Image (spheres, rainbow, N blue to C red):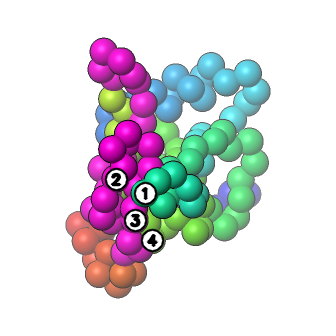
Amino acid sequence: MGRQASPVQIMRISDAAAARIREIVANSPEPVLGLRVGVRKGGCAGMTYAMDYVREIDPRDEVVEDKGVKVFVEPAAVLFLLGAEMDFRTDRFSAQFVFNNPNETSACGCGESVSLTPAKAPEALGSAAG
């Protein structure tokens, strides 16, 4: 049995992101449970957001269930994503997931990497719950 969704929602998922996640899961070549979100060191600003299919539940992941979709947050990414909103935007030149993240302190000019400061757990948990 998988881990239950956290009573405190780590991040929010916009309507556009939920619709895109539903589409990705439905069109996956293999059965998947949702998407996993994490952060990795890299890029000129220091960190990048990372996403992958979830084929098996990792019991250490935090589960965000919002608008009928599941996003699994890697344990190392939780404090970097507390209070964030996952969105999906389409413009003339791209279609991509974006994170409106209060923990983001700067971003590179190309938009591929960010600088993140971990949220202080007690403060962030209080604001994320409300």
x then y, percent, for residue 24: 56, 26
Image side of residue 48 versus residue 57, left or right = left
x then y, percent, for residue 9: 39, 61
Dot 1 falls on a residue whose secondary structure is: loop
Find the distance from the CA under tag 1 to the CA under tag 2.
Answer: 6 Å
* Quarter of the picture holding the C terminus: bottom left
- Amino acid type assigned to the residue bearing label 3 in the image: Leu
Q: Which residue is mark 4?
A: 79
For marks 1 and 3, give the one nearer the viewer.
1
Dot 3 falls on a residue whose secondary structure is: strand
Q: Which portion, as a residue range, is magenta?
A: 90-119
Q: Given contact means CB atoms under 8 Å apart, are the residues at marks 4 and 3 in contact?
A: no
Instruction: Decide: is 47 above or below 65.
Output: below
For this rendering, which residue is in front, 84 or 130?
Answer: 84
Dot 4 falls on a residue whose secondary structure is: helix
Question: Which residue lies at the image location 75% right of the left edge and 48% below the top edge?
Answer: 56
Q: Which residue is mark 3?
A: 116
For marks 4 and 2, give the one nearer the viewer.
2
* Magenta run includes residue 47: no
Point out the tag, 4 or 2, that comes first from the N-terminus. 4
Image side of residue 127 versus residue 35, left or right = left
Q: Given contact means CB atoms under 8 Å apart, are the residues at marks 1 and 2 in contact?
A: yes
For this rendering, which residue is in front, 44 or 87?
Answer: 44
- Amino acid type assigned to the residue bearing label 2 in the image: Ala
Q: Which residue is mark 2?
A: 107
* Quarter of the picture holding the N terminus: bottom right
